[in-house]
Image (spheres, rainbow, N blue to C red):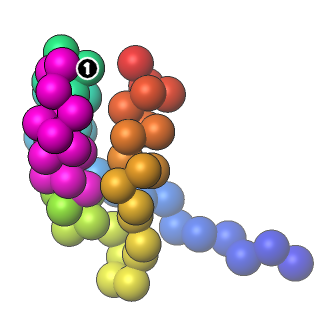
Amino acid sequence: MPVKRKPIEIPPEIAREFVADMKAYHAEQDEIRQDRIAVGTRHMLLQHMPTGTKLRLSEVKELFELMR
């Protein structure tokens, strides 16, 4: 039987910050600056996820691409 997870609740202001970061990420041409944006977003998201949750930088970048 699969384990049911409680949906993650992210406050609206954090969601807006995520969208702003995503736009900045896509507007940025420099890969190092893109990485810095993604790292900051990762830290922000982890603050609102259950303790012990793993979120890789590559997963944040994938989210940015999927939500483009």
Q: Is residue 24 above or below residue 3?
A: above
The answer to whether any part of residue 3 appears in the image is: yes
| Magenta-span inclusion, residue 40 | yes
Nearer to the camera, 65 or 45:
65
Q: Position of residue 60 (x, y in %)?
A: 37, 47
Nearer to the camera, 10 or 40:
40
The structure residue drawn at horizontal position 42% and vertical position 50%, both measured from the top left corner, is: 58
Q: How many discs mark residues in the rendered view?
A: 1
Q: Is residue 21 above or below residue 48?
A: above
The answer to whether any part of residue 19 appears in the image is: no
Q: Main secondary structure of the magenta part?
A: helix
Q: Is residue 10 above or below residue 1?
A: above
Q: Amino acid at mark 1?
A: His
Nearer to the camera, 28 or 67:
28
Q: Position of residue 56 (x, y in %)?
A: 40, 61
Quarter in which the N terminus is drawn: bottom right
Q: Position of residue 30 (x, y in %)?
A: 15, 27
Which residue bears the numbered disc 1? 26
The structure residue drawn at horizontal position 52% and vertical position 67%, both measured from the top left corner, is: 6
Q: Position of residue 8 (x, y in %)?
A: 41, 59
Q: Which residues are magenta?
A: 28-42
| Quarter where residue 61 is shown | top left
Q: Residues within 10 Å of mark 1 (few under 14, many from 20)?
A: few
Residue at the bottom extreme, as displayed: 52
Quarter in which the C terminus is drawn: top left
| Quarter where residue 19 is shown | top left
Disc 1, SS? helix
Nearer to the camera, 7 or 67:
67
The structure residue drawn at horizontal position 16% and vertical position 40%, both measured from the top left corner, is: 32
